[in-house]
Amino acid sequence: MRSAAWYAGDDRNSYIHRAWMRRGVPGDSFDGKPQIAIANTASDLTPCNAHLNEVADSVRQGIWEAGGVPLNLPVVSLGETNVRPTAMLWRNMAAMATEEMLRANPVDGVVLLGGCDKTIPSLLMAVASVDLPAVVVPGGPMLTGTFRGTPLGCGTDVWRLSEEVRAGTLTREAFLESESSMIRSRGHCNTMGTASTMGLLAEALGTTLPGVAGTPAADSRLLAHAQETGRQVVEMVRADRRPSQVLTEGSFRNAIVALAAIGGSTNAVVHLLAIAGRLGIPLTLEDFDRIGGDVPLLVDLQPAGRFLMEDLHRAGGLHAVLGQVVDLLDPDAVTVTGRPLVASLGDASIWDPSVIRTRGEPLLPNAGIAVLRGNLAPNGAIIKPAAASAHLLAHRGRAVVFDSVEDLHARIDDPDLDVDADSVLVLRGCGPKGYPGMPEVANLPLPRKLLRAGVRDMVRICDGRMSGTAYGTVVLHVAPEAAAGGPLARIRTGDVVTLDVAARRLDVEVSESDLATREPAPEMAAALARPRRGWERLYVDTVTGADTGADLDFLVGASGNEVARESH
Ligand code: FES
Ligand code: MG
């Protein structure tokens, strides 16, 4: 055991390490028993994860049962709705802090408790770099809330209802009344947003016990799975089964297939790229198109469709979905159990074909995230065709450019704004370096005068991200970002932009030489982040582009779990 470097022996130092850790545990707890950290993102400021202390209690029981010693390890937690300027600014910090604390401590294995958007990605990045046996328990989605007899989807219905208010078709009173109905129970957002997506992808990657992801947070089966996970991680330590064996190229293939079939969040692209970067797996933006492009959309969940996560679970869950695309999965990629993911799908059935479609009757034949290139996005940009309007996937229109979110909010509803339904709305300065942290602002609100005229979607282009709960014809993650000198910084209102998703192109009809000689817009440059100190400074100075996962350049790769020098 790695922890023997602290606890084994009869000298002064092992005495110190044992004595302070006795805290009421049996005396044989240090005689070679696996020491298992429970990396716990429970926090009252991360309401989606607030129930994870109870989940941790079940994990602890499983660890004791299997002969290990559980150790609660509270880690940096990121509440998507609270943290400003965006939780994404702190994903890499959470990953770094978790990685370092696992390495610094007498830990042999770890159970990862996450839920809200950035929490599972940061935990997986951490264990990819420290390479200690690890299993995820996704905290699970909340139950379906209803308002005036109709289900409310977290996030998605906020966007929808607030646009209805702006369009004048819903009163502000009714809108505010719906607020208390949306978050019905413990758990994370119940749409196919980023949290749901990353929980399901944690399973597709092989990092959960099979069949766990998507179990609602309030479902008693989640606690049973948590206890089983506690047993499992002890077995993994004994078998020395590490993230570097579970997270292989094949498991990323499985995650990309799953991402397309479930109609998952675009944020998964940047998270999977970052996790792969920690492992030295050469995953690229193009892999999402190449592997996921022809995968059918099988899950009818908001924001692309109708249902919510509770429906997906009762309809058969991820296993039923993957059972339909098993021929596209890597047959050798193993899970935390040491057995192939595909071996766990044997008898997966669809119990409600309106929620999970069969391969023969998909919602869309080609659902993967499309990767665009062109003179507006030399390093790539992405679009989720499943959440876009079919009639806008090939489009040509005049750009209306905004230099910051403040500029956007000041002008978007101006009756004199020169904009029509064919215009292309561009928002820049919102990439990792620019904002900083790459916020979810890419689904810009539509101009009120166009909403009132019945327009419900327009082409939008941004170097930021979009909430996984959002929808629309939105080109996002444009790279290089404007703040890193990307051409987005040099386009002007009135330039003609062409989007051709079938051809995977995003271009502005300005010659290369004209574009190159233009100066970056001064209003945009003035709005860019210039942090003087602290994490923001470190982040802006070292963050990589969205096309490579927006990790810090010095965090890419692994450091392993070698035991450091003695502390005294
Ligand atoms: Fe936490 Fe949506 S706000 S998952
Ligand atoms: Mg989000």
Image (spheres, rainbow, N blue to C red):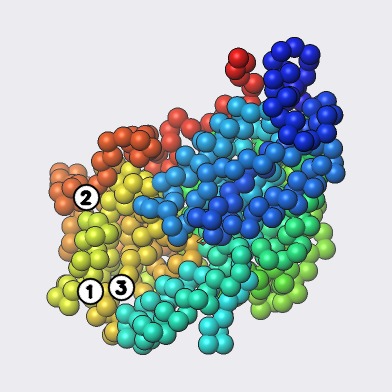
Categorize mark 2 by other alpha carbons within 10 Å: few (<14), some (14-19), many (20+). some
Which residue occupies 72% across, 77% down? 352
Front label number (1 vs 3): 1
- Left or right: residue 320 versus residue 509 is right
- Left or right: residue 167 versus residue 1 is left
Element at label 1: loop
Categorize mark 1 by other alpha carbons within 10 Å: few (<14), some (14-19), many (20+). some
Mark 1 and mark 3 lie on one chain; the one further toward the N terminus is 1
Q: Which amino acid does the dot numbered 3 rest on?
A: Leu
Give the camera-side residue of 260 and 116: 116
Quadrant that contains the C terminus: top right
Q: Which residue is mark 1?
A: 413
- Report x, y in % for residue 303: 51, 70
Confirm whether residue 237 shows in the render.
Answer: no
Give the camera-side residue of 73 and 149: 73
Q: Could you say which disc has been placed on residue 527 in the image? A: 2
Element at label 3: loop
- Left or right: residue 87 versus residue 29 is left
Give the camera-side residue of 176 and 243: 176
Which residue occupies 36% across, 77% down? 163
Q: Mark 2 to mark 3: distance in Å?
A: 22 Å
Q: Which residue is mark 3?
A: 446
Q: Which amino acid does the dot numbered 1 rest on?
A: Asp
Which residue occupies 75% across, 12% down? 11
- Compared with 84, 533 (above or below) is above
Front label number (2 vs 3): 2
Element at label 2: helix
- Report x, y in % for residue 244: 66, 35
